[in-house]
Amino acid sequence: MPRPPRSSDASPPTVSPTDQAELARQWVDAAHRVVVLTGAGISTDSGIPDFRGPQGIWTRNPAAEKMSDIRYYLADPEVRKAAWQSRLHHPAWTARPNRGHQAIVALEKRGRLHGLITQNIDELHQIAGNSPDKVVEVHGTVRRVMCWQCGTRSPMEDALARVRAGETDPACTRCGGILKSDTISFGQNLVPEVIDKAFELSREADLMLAIGSTLSVYPAAGVVPQAKENGARIVILNAEPTAMDELADVVIHGAIGEFLPRICGLDDTD
Ligand code: NAD
């Protein structure tokens, strides 16, 4: 089988994204342990903006990055106040899964999905119908809060109700500590068991699909070279070039909603 062109090849590509998607579909059909890594790009069609894409939150407003940095969040009550206001209006509350999420549900129904590692915090994979035990949320979830002091976790909705009732920076009801969404901010360590699970899955994969991520946030992005080192084929689907296009066996620069359903065998009638 001819090797599809890579972005580094000097000659112009001779294989169209549609042909590359067809090759990826055949690999999915032949694979036994497909591991999918998803980034913010899979949820943009659901109305949740990414951070670094052309319309990304940080691309349009670099100051927004402060709310995602644990050092600013803990040190500055004004940053927390702004973060709570922004959580009140988080697009995840109204977002519905899209065809990209449904494609991965189809992959699971076909018995091909070994694991789904997501950098996303919106839980749209579970809402779409993927089994929670298949989903590894390396950056946590926005649907829970966590106390920075005592570690207690509770539903985000309860904290938001307090903000709606007038509290600007609700504290932990158990210990008075600072509450934040149960997501991994910049400057914050990942949960060791969770990232370990992601790397374990990537070592077991025979095919990895990296979908809608710039593949520039570590350690999460490291699952891609890990899978490659352990013999998996790598397929990258993203609207723009990623940091890891060089090591992929197939790179598709295109829309997730167009190509992922084909790759995963989601029927147009589904
Ligand atoms: P990113 O913002 O760095 O990159 C997203 C990539 O997806 C971009 O390259 C963009 O061009 C591409 N993209 C956007 N829409 C697409 C589409 N419809 N089809 C194809 N490609 C598309 O995302 P990241 O690498 O996942 O890193 C951002 C971090 O921020 C994540 O680790 C995550 O924790 C967090 N985040 C999560 C959400 C969410 O939960 N939905 C949203 C924003 C950011």
Image (tube, rainbow, N blue to C red):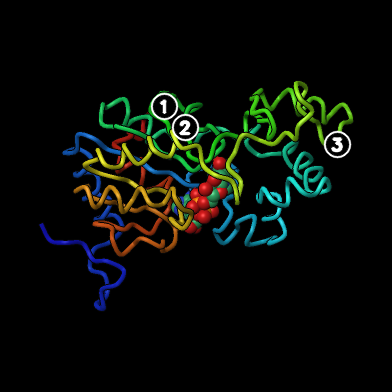
Q: CA distance from mark 3 to mark 2?
A: 31 Å
Q: Secondary structure at mark 3?
A: loop
Q: Provide the residue designation for mark 2.
A: 125
Q: State the image coordinates of residue 93 (x, y, percent, origin top left).
A: 65, 32
Q: Which is more N-terminal, label 1 or label 2?
A: 2
Q: State the image coordinates of residue 100 (x, y, percent, origin top left).
A: 43, 40
Are the residues tagged 3 and 2 within 8 Å (C-beta)?
Answer: no
Q: Provide the residue designation for mark 3.
A: 168
Q: Secondary structure at mark 1?
A: loop
Q: CA distance from mark 2 to mark 1?
A: 6 Å
Q: CA distance from mark 3 to mark 1?
A: 35 Å
Q: Provide the residue designation for mark 1.
A: 130
Q: Residue furthest bottom?
A: 10
Q: Residue at x 16, y 61 (%)?
A: 3
Quadrant in the rendering for residue 198: top left
Quadrant in the rendering for residue 142: top right
Q: Which is more N-terminal, label 2 or label 3?
A: 2
